[in-house]
Structure formats: C-alpha cells, structure tokens
Image (cartoon, grey):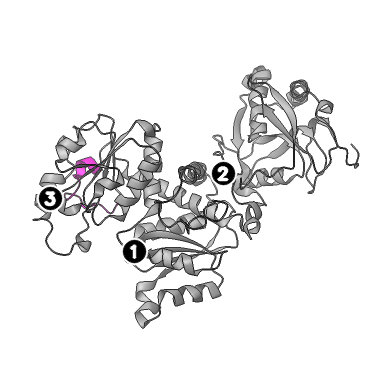
Amino acid sequence: MNNPQLDTDGQLRHLLSIEGLPKKILNQILDTAESFVGVAEREVKKVPLLRGKTVCNLFFENSTRTRTTFEIAAKRLSADVISLNVSTSSQSKGETILDTVDNLIAMHADMFVVRHAQSGAAHLIAKHVPPHIHVINAGDGRHSHPTQGLLDVFTIRKYKPELHNLRVAIVGDVLHSRVARSEIHALTTLGVPEVRVIAPKTLLPAQVEKLGVHVYHDMDEGLKDVDVIMMLRLQNERMNGAMLPSSEEYFKTYGLTPERLALAKPDAIVMHPGPMNRGVEIDSTVADGKQSVILPQVTYGIAIRMAVMAILGGGTGAAL
Amino acid sequence: MTDANHTLDHNQLPDAEALLLVLADKLKPLLKANTALVGIHSGGVWLMQRLLVLLADQIKLHQIEHGTLDVSFYRDDYAQRGLKAENRPSQIAFDVENKHIILIDDVFYTGRTTRAAMNELFDYGRPASITLIALVNRGGRELPIAPQMVAADLSLAASQHLQLTKLADGSLALELTPQHNSARP
C-alpha cells in the first residue's frame, strides 16, 4: 500500500498518523528527541537546523498547548514560525482549506503543522502540497494525534526503558480520543506486550479489541499491577447526546483516586495528555502526586516535535 | 604533508594504539587548571575515554572535567543529507564559560565537523579558548581551521574515507572505507 508518510526510500516525508509507521521510524524519532532534550538546558536553547525555513501552524481548531509547543519547537530549531488561527480568519470568509494552503505556499512556507476537527484534514493537505513541503498532523478529528502518541511513549521510555516488559492501561474516553488511538498504535508497534483500555462500553469504539488491546470495564480490575496509567480527558465538548449520567458519576467509577492508584504497581507512573479535568477523570492528589509525570510530558513534547521537524526538514537536496 | 592525492592501502595505515600514546604525550602539557576535554562523537569520544585513563593523574590533579558533542544539529550538510538516523545527546555537564576547551576528534579532514563543534560549544557559553587535537590529519581541509596537535599527518585521496573504529576487544584501529555517506542510510 502506498503510504503517503514515507518517501520512496522509506524515509519520513510527512507525519500524519502513527498507524503505518515502521518501528524503525518511531525509534528514529524517539532517539533524536533524546538528543533534543538537552538543548533546552543550555545557555542558548536553539540549534540552527531549520534556519531560513518557515513553519506554518495551521490551527483550524483551538489548542493552546499543542500550538505553543509546536511553536517553541520550531523556534528552537531556528525556523521562522507563523501561527494562524484559521477559525477566525479567511475560512470564516469562505476560503477552502487548500486555497489557504496554496496562499501560504505562495508565501514560501516550508512546513505545515495542521490541526483540524475533521479526520483526514492533514492527509488532504499532504496529498496536495509539492514534494519539498512537509506536513505534520497536530490532531485531526477522532483519528490521530501522532506527536502526542510519540511524546507519551517517549515519556514512558524515560521512566520505564524496558518497553517489552510493560503493562500499560489507557483509561477513559477512548471513543472520542485521537490521543488514545495514537498511543495504542505507538505502544503496540514498539513491542509493549500488554495494553489495556479501561472505559464504559459507551466510550469505547466498536471492535476496539482489533487494535490489540485488552478491554476492561471495571477500573479496579483493569489497574491491577499496571506499570503505566494513561488517563484521557473526558471530552465534554465532543460528546453528542447522553453517554454518561454525570461527571460526578463518572469520577466515582472511572476517576483516578489515590486508592485506585494503589492497585497499580507501587512505582507506576500516571500520565495525562492535558488539559485535565480535576475531579472528573483524575483526583488532584494524584495529578500533583509523586507518581505523576504529567508536566514532564509537556517538556518532552517539545523535544519530540523538534525531532519530527528536524527529521522532516533535512535531506531535501538528496531527495530531489 | 603534501598536496598530492595518495591512495593508501590498509597496510600503510599507522597503528591507532601507538598514535594514541603519542597523542597522550603531546596532550599532557596542555592539561592545567580550568581546562576541559570535549570528545566529538564517535571516534573523538573513544579517544577521550582512553586519554582520561592514560592521563588520569594529571586529570585528577587539575580537576579536569569532560564532555561529549554530537554535532548532528550543527552540520552544514543537513539540507542535503538530513539528520543521521543515529545521533546521541551532547553532554556538556560543566560550565563552558571561561574554560580552556580541548576538542578531541579522531580524523581531521575538511574542518567542517570542527566548525560545527565550535558553533555548538558557543551555545553553551563563551570558552576562554578552544584547542583542537586529532589522532590523524588526513589532509583535504576546506576551511581556515586546523588542529593544533595531531599524532600523525597523512595525505589521502578524496576518494578514500578514513575512520577510527573500536574493535571487539576495546582497542582502537584506523580503517579505510569507500566514500563516506553516512547520513540518510
């Protein structure tokens, strides 16, 4: 099958989803990110790789954290960055996505970071752009959020380097979560032997088992002896119709409390992609507790985004 | 050193282990207070690790710190070749500001790696000085940069690629390989 993410040599050309990326590419991104972690600790937090290049953040859907970390990542690579909040600009005047993209290409943009509420938006742009331009999916609909998935496995690898020995639980609104999908693909591709999803039936996609995960509806049972707990945000704004009785009720059955955390391994880490709903999916004591690695996730997110952009942005001379 | 393009074969290469001892002798007088060693990946780091042992007394006496650089993020051929699939974090755990830095590389060739390494070092701070030492100068530099100290001068044809390797028993050896093209495997 033709994979639009890879060029004819099997090198990364666009990052659209983790699904379909070989382990080798995932490891290349993670290893490169390792080298970028240290850059942030220097006197000068910049490397010159993307000097003279223009990175365009195209956010058709709001996301302050993701946009900010992409922006910081591009700037630490010395790129010029333009962040367009498209929901408030030309699109509202009726311009199509591809027209917006063509206009930015005419302004010599070299890379697009795309966030859109519709699944497939980044694919559409990737298929449209000329070969020297690279596209990174920063979240499309319910489909995929590859840099989030990558930063999550990077964080896990930092705290639990033996991936082939881990039991990981993903808890919450899997149905609406592009993050969960990307995490599952990343974890299984990298050889994590046991990935569990814990959620009520109404928040799980049909046939979720086909992704290679073990399904639990009972949280206490699902958390038993896990090494990593990845909480998901309860996506209130995505919820159409009543899938849950109330957020208080949800917290009672699926909220991560200190008592429930105690069921996992004593050195288990707790993750959350943010933004957190304290008291809905996670108790504040846990979110701020010593097993929480939620803020390191944010820090590592910059290194991962730098790695992806650095891998995409180089080597165009040889490829053409 | 001559400008002629000699093609050497493998038996004509000097013994890296012998050169290492020569380099250690030459380096010894440079080790004083406020000096730090920085190895450039990979060969320069192997050399540094050996030098740290060979010169352990001086290193301890002057409290000499050390670090490593992987210059991948500063290379000038990134636009053509992209990032190498393998790169390692640079580790400079000491304060570069006002230090006398001794940069260690295995084979000095065009000078482009040294330029990249100097640019990277300056992103950590402003060193008092930078000295470049290399095991071998193979000839062919393209920039106004040269090592102050080498254990051997060779003159190799541009078609030959000389690199340091680490053998299974941990010892170092020079080897010739076909034209170097490590990035974008």
> Image quadrant for the C terminus of chain A?
bottom right
Q: Position of residue A30 (x, y in %)?
A: 46, 43
- Which quadrant of the view contains residue B106? top right
The residue depicted at 67 percent of the width and 32 percent of the height is: B43
Same chain under badges 1 and 3? The reply is yes
Mark 1, residue position: A119
In three-dimensional space, the C-alpha distance between marks 2 and 1, rounded to whole angstroms, equals 30 Å
Q: Which residue is at the far front?
A: A1
A171 lies left or right of A2: left
Quick check: A307 above or below B109?
A: below
Q: Secondary structure at mark 2?
A: loop
In the image, what residue type sits under mark 3? Answer: Tyr
In three-dimensional space, the C-alpha distance between marks 1 and 3, rounded to whole angstroms, equals 27 Å
**Mark sitting on residue A250:** 3
A106 lies left or right of A234: right
Q: Which residues are magenta?
A: A274-287
The residue depicted at 30 percent of the width and 47 percent of the height is: A211
Quick check: B122 above or below A93?
A: above
Q: Earlier in the sequence, mark 1 or mark 3?
A: 1
* Chain under callout 1: A
Q: Residues within 10 Å of mark 1 (few under 14, many from 20)?
A: some
Q: Nearer the viewer, mark 1 or mark 3?
A: 1
* Chain under callout 2: B
